Amino acid sequence: KCLEEAKEKKLAEIAELETKCSDLKGVMTELKTQLYAKFGSHINLETDED
């Protein structure tokens, strides 16, 4: 029972973090759009995932 409660708590925390992550990605996309509008191709905001 205690394990189930802990598991439910962690799943709720994960869901909350995923929501925050999604919100932050939206903000980042908005900022990226604004920065590219201002600086054009003079900046690179893409991540290098090599």
Image: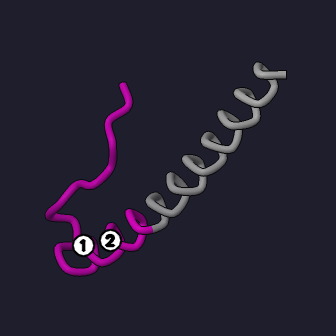
Label 2 amino acid?
Leu
Q: Nearer the viewer, residue 19 or 8?
A: 8
In the displayed structure, would residue 33 be above or below residue 2? below
Give the number of the mark in front: 1 or 2: 2
Q: For the N terminus, which image quadrant?
A: top right
Q: Residues within 10 Å of mark 2 (few under 14, many from 20)?
A: few
In the displayed structure, would residue 45 be above or below residue 28? above
Label 1 amino acid?
Leu
| Farthest residue, direction right | 1
| Farthest residue, direction front | 2
Residue under the point 17% across and 73% down: 39
Q: Nearer the viewer, residue 45 or 27?
A: 27
| Disc marking residue 23 | none
Residue 9: x and y, percent?
68, 37
| Disc marking residue 35 | 1
Residue 6: x and y, percent?
70, 27
Check contact, mark 1 vs mark 2: CB within 8 A.
yes
Q: Nearer the viewer, residue 46 or 23?
A: 23
Span highlighted in magenta in the image:
27-50
Provide the secondary structure element on which disc 1 rests.
Answer: helix
Residue 50: x and y, percent?
36, 25
Spatial CA span between label 1 and label 2: 6 Å
| Disc marking residue 31 | 2
Would residue 8 appear left or right of 10 to someone viewing this image?
right
